[in-house]
Amino acid sequence: MLLKDKVFIVTGASSGIGEELCKQLSTSGSMVVCAARRLDELERVSKAINVLGGRSIAVQTDITITEQCQKMVGKTIESFGRIDGLVLNAGISMWARFEDIADVGFFKDLINTNYLGSVNCVHAALPHLKETKGKIISCSTGQALMGFPSHSGYAASKHALHGFLSSLAIENKAEITILEAILGWIRDTNLRGNAYGADGKQRSMPPKKHTKESVALDSCVERILVGIKKDWRTVYIPRKLRLIPFFKAFWRWYLEFRADSVVTKPEKT
Ligand SMILES: NC(=O)c1ccc[n+]([C@@H]2O[C@H](COP(=O)([O-])OP(=O)(O)OC[C@H]3O[C@@H](n4cnc5c(N)ncnc54)[C@H](OP(=O)(O)O)[C@@H]3O)[C@@H](O)[C@H]2O)c1
């Protein structure tokens, strides 16, 4: 897909990967609808794009509310007349072993945001995406393809989204394309800092610092854009994550050992 003069909706545009995606899509010639709950942050992102000559609007949207997703799509059509790309990026995470969790109520928030919130967005945008032979892009994770300690509810929500999008890809193969970005640890976003802890509350501090194996935000987004332009079905960031399905089939014990050690290894001070 060429990016010039295309119209993208990006959910979770108020920080991290979503913010950077809006900026890089705009630099590549696309028009961008920045969507998330915090309007002041969305307006900051949209303003930064527009002062550089880009075209973007901020649309306050809580993706867990169906009507707000319909409104987001309606505003996009009203402002730009079409939708070429829907980026399912809004997401929340957790960091706690299951047995340590006092109240599992926040698992509903994980499912409502990461899975059902994306379903809401796709349901509202699909007819418009079919008209343009457009693309859905999911900012997913290696944890959509394998289990991961301390992330049980998050991994489950991303597995659900993966299953949903894989089914949509078959149902709509002549009309839309789907790109799943399978991401590892990405630096300089708020995901880890906002993750739910064992007390069922969102943290105010990251549970662990990123290691040098993590990926810089701008390189991550540059590579997602390569995947969009080349019409790939999957992009693995970093590339070594493409080995997950292979290890899962043949050396599952090694994959699980690595996942466990990443989470439990004490931090270097
Ligand atoms: N960072 C990583 O290491 C990593 C790795 C793998 C996958 N991912 C995925 O990448 C995506 C982006 O994460 P990030 O790292 O950029 O985290 P982030 O900086 O925390 O961004 C998350 C975004 O989601 C939005 N959001 C949360 N709940 C929402 C809701 N109900 N409705 C609308 N927007 C909502 C937040 O905005 P508001 O609070 O303003 O609504 C924010 O803009 C997530 O789906 C995450 O699972 C990240």
Image (spheres, grey):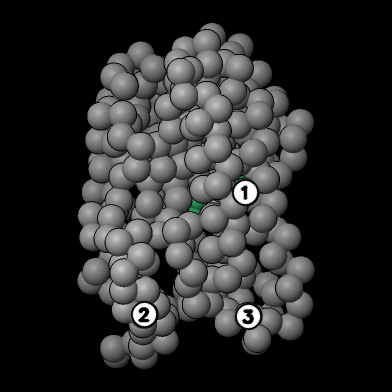
Q: Position of residue 48 (x, y in %)?
A: 39, 34
Dot 2 falls on a residue whose secondary structure is helix
Residue placed most toward the observer, 32 or 157: 157
Position above or below: 168 against 202:
above
Frontmost of labels 3 and 2 is: 2
Name the residue that disc number 1 marks.
Answer: 115
Q: Is residue 215 visible?
A: no
Q: Quadrant of residue 151?
A: bottom right
- CA separation in Å, label 3 and label 1: 20 Å
Q: Is mark 2 within 8 Å of ligand 1?
A: no
Q: Position of residue 256 (x, y in %)?
A: 39, 77
Lateral position of residue 2 relative to residue 89, left or right: left
Q: Is residue 177 visible?
A: yes
Amino acid carrying label 3: it is: Phe
Amino acid carrying label 2: it is: Trp
Lateral position of residue 62 relative to residue 253, left or right: right
Task: Name the quadrant of the C terminus.
Answer: bottom left
Identify the disc placed on residue 253: 2
Name the residue that disc number 3 marks.
Answer: 98
